[in-house]
Amino acid sequence: MKYLISCDLDGTTLNRQGELTTKTINVLRHLRNLGHIVVLATGRPFSGAIGKYEEIGLDTPLITDNGGSIENPKDPSFAKQRTYIPVHMMHQLFTFAKPMIISTFFSIDDVVYAYQYDKKLEEFFSGIHSDRVIEGEYTSFDVQPTGMVFLIQSDKQEPFESYIDVNFGHTLSHRLWGVENGYAVYEVYLKHVSKSSAVKYLLDFYDVPQSQWIALGDGINDVEMIRDAGIGVAMKNAVPELHEVADIITEISHDEEAVANFLIDYFKLEDFR
């Protein structure tokens, strides 16, 4: 029986140092060699995920930008799937939010577009690099983002959310990542796009039933994926929202190789214990 196994990276497949362990690499590589479809599904941009993909030695599609992009780095014949926020919506939201913005950015391939660039962004969004940043007001950018991250003043959450809901509620959604030190971190993304929607595209592509989809994650951006999978696995260290929708919660954290150990148990890979 062939499974599609979708793995989040940060806080799930990677340890707290942001690294893949040898055990995790070997287990994922072995499952791929057995014919299962191992897919990394991450909020990172392509440039921040491709290194981990290559370290594992995958040849399957790679999901980045929280489902906004799907491509297969090893197969040029695989049609890249990318969904964009219209430029006029980006401009309109930026114009409204500008007085409350501490910093904001989005990425396209290996380029980061940012306004009031702040190194804090690298803490929240792995894989971006300040030497690849183009700075300016969003209204000067004529490129379409797959999603945007905003650091706004923490006392402006209500007007920021309301503006998006009222003006773009049919198209855009927002996700609050956290509030600290006077700023709130938001992700703004297309309403119909998620890691789950991207994996469902691949289920159809590979003709794998949803019941044979195993998803592993830890963050708020994994909720749809864990909820919709045939077997949704939340890390012990996952956010409470993920524990609420998961079929299984691991007894150990990402820093204890929870992904590798779960897959060893599920597929009975005794040689990898």
Image (cartoon, grey):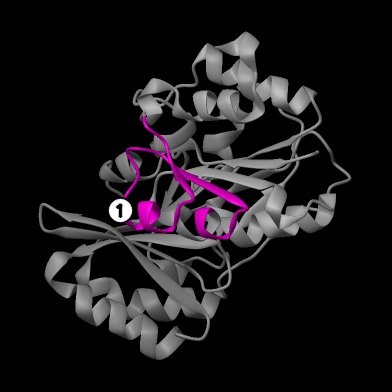
Question: Where on the picture, by quarter, is residue 41?
Answer: top right
Q: Position of residue 125 (x, y in %)?
A: 39, 44
State the residue position of label 1. Answer: 240
Residue 246: in magenta span: yes
- The front one of 57 and 36 is 36
Q: Position of residue 248 (x, y in %)?
A: 46, 44
Mark 1 surroundings within 10 Å by alpha-carbon count, few (fewer than 14), some (14 through 19), many (20 or more)? few
Image side of residue 99 versus residue 191, left or right: left
The outermost residue toward the right is 77
Q: Residue at x 28, y 41 (%)?
A: 119
Q: Residue at x 54, y 52 (%)?
A: 65
Residue 131: tell me if it is visible.
Answer: no
- The front one of 74 and 267 is 267
Q: Secondary structure at mark 1?
A: helix
Q: Residue at x 71, y 26 (%)?
A: 31
The outermost residue toward the top is 271
Q: Quadrant of the N terminus?
A: top right
Question: Where on the picture, by quarter, is residue 174?
Answer: bottom left
What amino acid does circle 1 point to? Pro
The segment highlighted magenta reads 226-251
Q: Position of residue 203 (x, y in %)?
A: 75, 54
Q: Position of residue 254 (x, y in %)?
A: 40, 29
Q: Is residue 222 above or below residue 269?
A: below
Image side of residue 10 versus residue 269, left or right: left
Residue 36: tell me if it is visible.
Answer: yes
